Image (cartoon, rainbow, N blue to C red):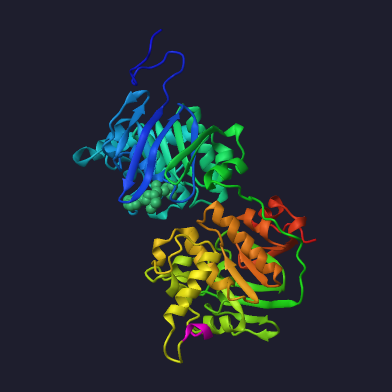
């Protein structure tokens, strides 16, 4: 019997994996970002890496790309032990990476960006023609169409991403790593990206796709590795697993992917909106006459592609943008002048607002959790010692209790908001707004950038608020989220409501048509 002790030797029966990682560990100070990780990725496959925020996915791939050095472990490329001390070495080993945040030069053309760092100085001119030819060829081979002469700053995000891919292919990458590539894309752009990835696979390229979206894993990968808290939990064939199973492996416990809710029992009208209009500071009409009614005990979902007036609708109702028309809360007209102080008046009237952009509007990142929870509510009875002095210890105790109920981790109310993960920041904002027991909750993109475990929790809290008889206006660009949470769905397009449907009498196809501006056929 021959015992193969040479890790570098190829086995004739099975080709060596394109990538093999053995026992990779990496710590950042006290944080063990990767713990003894081993995986193999077969050549010519699309391999997914899935895990919640902070699981260690980006760290692992940054080690493979030579951006970080592992504390221990080995990397084998095509069965050969390979040192990757920096990204130049990674490129020499045939590895290309498309980062979460693109590293393109804005005021350069596509062509210039692609050859940047490969060709240099006096040799630049003659090679431009050659580069243009090979770019055209690559574009043809892989459906990667972009105008080589276009300036990066004029390209959509989806096109900029294609430039990143072209850049890697121009450097003759055989292995392509994409880190959360669809986070910035529209559904149509994401579909196009997946077509490109399948083309690349057909040409024998090996692709690693990092994502936290189960749907993408199921749709496009051949195999998938699950990471949790720095560890590699499992590697599976995609065809032999399910979203439910992957979610459980990611979170480490059973998770409800579907929202569990009883039919709504709508009561009196809480919010009545008529002919609501908003003109932005460039004079463009962003809301062109919105009419809607929202009742106690129901969730009205507003679907639509981002930028069709949903943000303006939330902001004018929250009192932070100005508009015309009428909006009545419990029969009382709301002030639509959008004066700065009006957020305060709204809260007193029973309106809570979880803004879409929680970094800009929801939280002050340098302030502690307890300061953020008091933010906007500092005048509240339980929060003051007397007319002038806030009762810090009372606010801290209240915050700690809220953080416990909302399972905010870590449960430390003295920590600055910026030190919490996206999901936990969102839970802080929700805790502040929901626990005030509002009549009307305005909530935008409730689970953007949030982990599955936290999504389940947030959805349950929204449904619980509905069942307590509150009215909820939900804006989300995630159609899945709209479909699973809403009792009624209105679709916005170009500042108008294109149509409205009971959630159980419509589907993605019909809503998708209205989102594209086609009237789904008013019933
Ligand atoms: P993922 O990509 O799965 O969201 P990351 O690999 O980015 O996870 O992060 C894993 C852990 O390592 C997290 O706790 C993160 O805060 C930490 N981490 C990542 N990069 C650094 C860094 N440069 N310095 C300190 N800690 C880091
Ligand atoms: Mg990451």
Q: Nearer the viewer, residue 371 or 146?
A: 371
Give how far across and how far down residue 287 sits, in percent.
60, 72
- Residue 486: name its quadrant: bottom right
Quadrant of residue 439 in the image? bottom right
In magenta, the rendered stretch is: 379-384
Considering depth in this image, is 90 or 312 the residue closer to the camera?
90
What residue is at 42 percent from the left and 91 percent from the top? 388
The number of discs equals 0
Is residue 400 on the magenta stretch?
no
Identity of the residue furthest to the right in this view: 523
On the image, the x and y values in percent for residue 482 come to 65, 58
Q: Is residue 442 left or right of residue 227?
A: right
Say left or right for 171 vs 177: left
Q: Among all residues in the image, which is located at the extreme left?
A: 122
x%, y% of residue 401?
A: 52, 70
* Quadrant for the N terminus in the image: top left
Indicate whether 367 appears above or below 410.
below
As for residue 383 lying within the magenta part, the answer is: yes
Above or below 153: residue 14: above
Asked whether, in this view, residue 493 is left or right of residue 233, the answer is right
Q: Is residue 478 above or below residue 64?
A: below
Can residue 502 be seen by looking at this rendering? yes
Where in the figure is residue 408, as x and y percent of width and height? Answer: 49, 62
Task: Give the quadrant of the C terminus.
Answer: bottom right
Residue drawn at (64%, 81%), measured in percent from left and top?
Answer: 325
Residue 148 appears anywhere in the view: no
Q: Nearer the viewer, residue 280 or 101?
A: 101
Q: Residue at x 38, y 67 (%)?
A: 416
């Amino acid at each position: 019997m021959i015992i193969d002790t040479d890790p570098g030797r190829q086995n004739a029966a099975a080709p060596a994996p394109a990538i093999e990682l053995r026992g990779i560990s990496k710590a950042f100070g006290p944080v063990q970002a990767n713990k003894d990780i081993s995986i193999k990725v077969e050549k010519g496959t699309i391999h997914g890496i899935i895990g919640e925020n902070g699981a260690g996915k980006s760290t692992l791939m940054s080690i493979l790309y030579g951006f970080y050095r592992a504390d221990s472990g080995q990397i084998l490329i095509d069965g050969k032990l390979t040192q990757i001390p920096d990204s130049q070495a990674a490129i020499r080993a045939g590895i290309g990476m498309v980062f979460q945040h693109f590293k393109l030069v804005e005021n350069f053309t596509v062509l210039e960006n692609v050859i940047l760092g490969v060709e240099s100085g006096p040799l630049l001119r003659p090679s431009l023609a050659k580069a243009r030819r090979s770019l055209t060829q690559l574009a043809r081979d892989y459906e990667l169409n972009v105008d080589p002469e276009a300036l990066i700053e004029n390209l959509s995000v989806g096109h900029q991403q294609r430039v990143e891919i072209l850049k890697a292919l121009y450097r003759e990458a055989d292995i392509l790593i994409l880190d959360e590539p669809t986070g910035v894309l529209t559904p149509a752009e994401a579909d196009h990206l997946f077509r490109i990835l399948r083309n690349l696979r057909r040409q024998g390229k090996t692709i690693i796709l990092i994502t936290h979206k189960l749907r993408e894993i199921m749709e496009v990968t051949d195999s998938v590795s699950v990471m949790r808290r720095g560890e590699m939990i499992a590697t599976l064939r995609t065809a032999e697993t399910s979203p439910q199973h992957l979610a459980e492996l990611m979170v480490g416990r059973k998770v409800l992917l579907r929202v569990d809710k009883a039919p709504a029992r709508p009561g009196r009208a809480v919010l009545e909106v008529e002919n609501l209009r908003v003109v932005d500071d460039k004079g463009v009409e962003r809301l062109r006459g919105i009419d809607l009614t929202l009742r106690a005990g129901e969730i009205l979902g507003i679907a639509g592609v981002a930028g069709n007036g949903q943000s303006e609708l939330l902001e004018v109702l929250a009192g932070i943008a100005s508009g015309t028309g009428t909006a009545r809360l419990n029969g009382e007209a709301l002030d639509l002048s959008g004066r700065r102080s009006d957020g305060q008046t709204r809260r007193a009237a029973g309106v809570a607002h979880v803004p879409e952009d929680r970094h800009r509007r929801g939280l002050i990142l340098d302030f502690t959790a307890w300061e953020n929870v008091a933010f906007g509510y500092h005048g509240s009875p339980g929060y003051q010692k007397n007319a002038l002095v806030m009762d810090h210890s009372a606010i801290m105790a209240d915050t700690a209790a809220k953080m416990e109920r909302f399972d905010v981790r870590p449960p430390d109310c003295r920590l600055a908001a910026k030190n919490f993960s996206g999901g936990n920041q969102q839970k802080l904002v929700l805790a502040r707004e929901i626990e005030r027991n509002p009549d009307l909750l305005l909530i935008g993109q409730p689970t953007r950038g949030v982990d599955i475990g936290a999504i389940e929790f947030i959805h349950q809290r929204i449904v619980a608020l509905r069942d307590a008889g509150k009215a909820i206006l939900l804006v989300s660009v995630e159609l899945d989220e709209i479909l699973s949470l809403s009792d009624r769905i209105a679709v916005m397009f170009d500042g108008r409501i294109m149509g409205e449907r009971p959630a159980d009498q419509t589907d993605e196809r019909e809503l998708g048509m209205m989102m594209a501006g086609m009237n789904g056929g008013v019933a």
